[in-house]
């Protein structure tokens, strides 16, 4: 990817993020500032990882699994979580920067919520529990802890599309979330029920 293409992608991602924040009620100036912060952090993360401007490879996991047992094991684990070949190829077909923007945006949402709950007087444990209850936690499902098992990133785009049906009725989503201890548990149940 050329420098010009990288700049074009960065501008496009800032515009997309800005539109999302404006749809959430932010004024343009605030939305643009936050969108720039997210995309700049994502660029920094990509550069640190050595993938900035690198072309995505939808077949990356499969190619690595031929030679690396860790990748092979990862694919087996995420498939048990409901991940399809299409999910894998769609996620890894996104540019590294697009994936990094999604990651940074999710992190900032969770962090902002955590601070909000602390400001409401929750202790750190209760604030973290509220975040796990209302927000997805993404990562390697093999790295679970006593509180939850992360959802594989390869489910993220499917989760986004599923959640969009609740945009016109956020109370229905809130009611659904209330039925589960964590957002991740709700997503796994929706997959098992064929809803997602």
Image: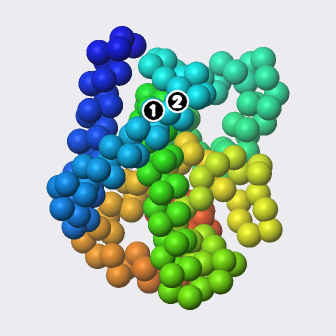
Reply above or below: 49 against 99. above
Give the SS element for disc 1.
Answer: helix
Reply above or below: 196 against 67. below
Q: State the residue lying farthest toward the top.
A: 2
| Image-based side of 194 in relation to 75, left or right | left
| Image-based side of 102 in relation to 23, left or right | right
* Residue 14 image point, x, y percent: 29, 40
* Residue 20 image point, x, y percent: 27, 54
* Within-10-Å neighbours for mark 2: few <14, some 14–19, many 20+: many
Residue bearing the label numbered 2: 46
| Residue positioned 27% across, 24% down in the render | 8
Give the SS element for disc 2.
Answer: helix
Q: Is residue 192 visible?
A: no
Residue bearing the label numbered 1: 43
Reply above or below: 20 against 43. below
Q: State the residue lying farthest toward the left.
A: 28
| Residue positioned 65% across, 83% down in the render | 123
Q: Is residue 152 visible?
A: yes
Kindly indicate the quadrant of the structure image that contains residue 193.
bottom right
| Residue positioned 78% across, 62% down in the render | 145
In the picture, the disc for residue 125 is none
* Residue 160 image point, x, y percent: 40, 54
């Amino acid at each position: 990817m050329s420098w010009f293409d990288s700049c074009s992608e960065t501008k496009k991602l800032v515009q997309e993020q800005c539109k999302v924040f404006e749809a959430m009620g932010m004024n343009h100036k605030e939305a643009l500032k936050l969108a720039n912060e997210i995309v700049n952090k994502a660029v920094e993360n990509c550069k640190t990882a050595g993938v900035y401007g690198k072309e995505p490879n939808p077949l990356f996991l499969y190619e690595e699994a031929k030679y690396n047992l860790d990748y092979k094991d990862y694919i087996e684990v995420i498939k048990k979580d409901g991940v399809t070949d299409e999910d894998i190829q769609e996620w890894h077909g996104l540019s590294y920067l697009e994936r990094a923007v999604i990651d940074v945006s999710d992190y900032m949402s969770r962090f902002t919520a955590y601070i909000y709950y602390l400001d409401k007087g929750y202790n750190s444990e209760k604030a973290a529990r509220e975040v796990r209850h209302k927000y997805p936690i993404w990562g390697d499902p093999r790295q679970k802890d006593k509180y939850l098992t992360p959802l594989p990133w390869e489910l993220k785009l499917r989760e986004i599309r599923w959640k969009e049906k609740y945009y016109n009725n956020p109370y229905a989503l809130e009611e659904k979330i209330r039925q589960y201890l964590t957002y991740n548990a709700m997503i796994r149940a929706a997959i098992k029920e064929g809803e997602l």
